[in-house]
């Protein structure tokens, strides 16, 4: 079982920045695919970014490339999502997800939410214009 807890959400004006953190319970020496997803009201949950821990392979959705950065902090057992140049369309509930069944190639290709086994409760991000 993997437990995930998100933090760092909030409200910010367009162009601002936020950093989301996902604190996990798995041991850092076991490679895991960890992803950030988001879901706006009335929309499907979409993958934003993923990282394959240890190997550092990453994936970014086209809509966030160049603005968001996913990284791992093994000292604090967290996966961070640094979000810059935020836009109103980034407004959503952001979820951390993890899966340990597949390797780095799977993790870095982009995958639907249904493929991830473990989920956090989410943290709200609101960007005002």
Image (cartoon, rainbow, N blue to C red):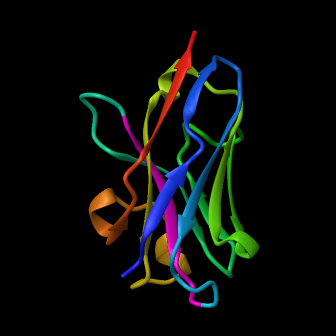
Residue extending farthest to the bottom is 29
Residue in front for this viewpoint, 128 or 114 = 128
**Residue 37 belongs to magenta span:** yes
Q: Is residue 45 left or right of residue 16?
A: left
Q: Position of residue 107 (x, y in %)?
A: 50, 71
Answer above or below: position of 112 versus 20: below
Answer above or below: position of 51 versus 6: below
Query: Can the viewer see residue 58?
Result: yes
First to last magenta residue range? 30-39
Q: Would you identify the image quadrant in which residue 119 lies?
A: bottom left
Q: Position of residue 60 (x, y in %)?
A: 58, 52
Q: Is residue 117 left or right of residue 37?
A: left
Name which residue lies at 70% across and 70% down.
76
Q: Would you identify the image quadrant in which residue 114 lies?
A: bottom left
Answer above or below: position of 40 versus 8: above
Name which residue lies at 75% across and 74% down.
75
Name which residue lies at 55% across and 21% down.
127
């Amino acid at each position: 079982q993997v437990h995930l807890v998100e933090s760092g959400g909030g409200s910010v004006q367009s162009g601002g920045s936020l950093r989301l953190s996902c604190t996990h319970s798995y041991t850092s020496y076991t490679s895991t695919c960890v992803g950030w997803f988001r879901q706006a009201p009335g929309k499907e949950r979409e993958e934003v970014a993923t990282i394959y821990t240890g190997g550092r392979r990453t994936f970014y959705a086209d809509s966030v490339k160049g603005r968001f950065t996913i990284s791992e902090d093994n000292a604090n057992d967290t996966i961070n999502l640094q979000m810059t140049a935020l836009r109103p369309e980034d407004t959503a509930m952001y979820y951390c997800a993890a899966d340990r069944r597949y390797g780095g190639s799977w993790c870095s290709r982009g995958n639907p939410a249904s493929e991830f086994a473990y989920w956090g409760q989410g943290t709200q991000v609101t960007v005002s214009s």
